[in-house]
Amino acid sequence: MRNPLSKKIVTIQPSGIRKFFDIVSEMPDAISLGVGEPDFDTPWHVREEGIHSLEMGRTFYTSNAGLKELKEEISKYLERRYHTVYNPTDEIMVTVGGSEAIDIAMRAMLDPGDEVLIPQPSYVSYLPCAILANGVPVIIELKAENEFRLTVEQLEQAITDKTKLLVLPFPNNPTGAVMERADLEAIAEVVIKHDLFVLSDEIYSELTYLEEHVSIASLPGMWERTITINGFSKSYAMTGWRLGYACGPKEIIKQMLKIHQFAIMCAPTTSQYAAVEALKNGDEDVARMREEYNGRRRYLLHRFKEMGLECFEPFGAFYMFPCIKEFGMTSDEFATKLLKDQKVAVVPGTAFGDCGEGFIRISYAYSLSNLKEALGRIECFITKLREKK
């Protein structure tokens, strides 16, 4: 019998994030700091709107691009928060999470051989999505000494005559790094000079702690070059509702919508009605959760300092990326031994690219009580490692 599998798909590795999560789910008394999922319930008024939509029998397909009311609220929200203006009719589409938006944006924009610049460490989907879209991933290794920000020098060195798309994954998963306005202005100059496009994944845009997020699409000359991706999972604690959106020039959105029509049809109707309520009346919920995350962020930084564990200060998302190079083992080995010895699950830095070696990702999207217990176990683990030296 002939091989039933695509040669392309068998070369793609499964997500490194899920490996430790699957193990810890079957381990009694284990604490997982591995998954980037808010521990908050979706705000009650948002859930209530979803329930109401079901009670009203709103279980039909919406239009392919999403509910008109939702797209209008997304447009108002983006103009209010990030000073970007999109026509809800043909410059916004609703997707099944931000991940679908990433996938279909690349499939709509890339021809075989087009190069996609992917700064790493970064979210696990960018590289496989580029490959599945017949693009050629080109990795830019972000460095701790630059606070894991993308620099102009790194970008210039990576560009060739085949480069078409730059992925801009900030605020960043797994490092928590952000790009400030001055950083983005410098990147924008290079993008315009080389006639590139940007896929800006801004799913953590509401979770910045010192300065407000700046969207690169708001900068002069960048709106027409940028597909902006965002969603409801992180900021509104709506991961299981599976709802995101993409915004950009209508000629790109039109082609993305074509793929969405054939592969998905439309995002979940109940989720869309709930999201309208989130955008209309959810600002206080977002502010409350952001403040709680910031308290956890400060606590982890304090504890790492007490342990003598090197970690740069992240200013966005809800992740820490401490360095474990002093212990002389790979990130995977460290995470595996920590799980076995102390029943704490973290994610090896290499799950987010080879340059993540020597780091682990710790999510603080968990209760403070869980974090305190887990950090105590981690301190016990590294103390024993140092004593063996």
Image (spheres, rainbow, N blue to C red):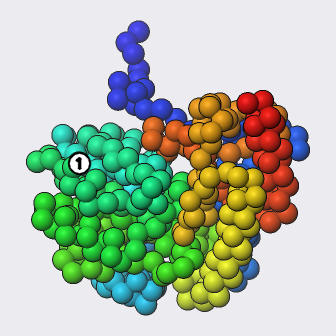
- Please indicate whether residue 153 sits to the left or right of residue 100 in the image: left
Residue matched to label 1 = 158
Q: Residues within 10 Å of mark 1 (few under 14, many from 20)?
A: some
**Residue 89 visible, this angle:** no
Residue 199 located left or right of residue 380 = left
**What is the x, y in percent for residue 282?**
61, 85
Q: Is residue 127 visible?
A: yes
The image shows residue 189 at horizontal and vertical percentages of 19, 70
The secondary structure type at the circle numbered 1 is helix
Q: Is residue 5 above or below residue 328?
A: above
Q: Residue 85, how many percent across, how many down?
A: 31, 85
Q: Residue at x 25, y 70 (%)?
A: 186
At label 1, which amino acid type do we have?
Answer: Ala
- Above or below — where is 249 with respect to 278? above
Q: Quadrant of the C terminus?
A: top right
Number of marks drawn: 1
Q: Residue furthest right?
A: 29
Up the image or down, 193 lies above or below 276; here it is: above
Query: Image point 48% across, 32% down: which residue?
Result: 13
Q: Nearer the viewer, residue 196 or 359?
A: 359
Task: Choose top left, top right, bottom left or bottom right for residue 19.
Answer: top right
> What is the quadrant of the N terminus in the image?
top left
286 to the left or right of 95: right
Q: Nearer the viewer, residue 308 or 280?
A: 308
| Residue positioned 27% across, 74% down in the render | 185
Residue 69 is left or right of residue 157, and the answer is right
Query: Which quarter of the figure has residue 130?
Result: top left
- Residue at image coords 15%, 47%: 160
Snapshot quadrant of residue 365 = bottom right
- Give x and y (percent) for residue 266: 45, 63
In this view, the residue in front, 77 or 202, is: 202
Q: Can you name the residue that lies furthest to the top here?
A: 1
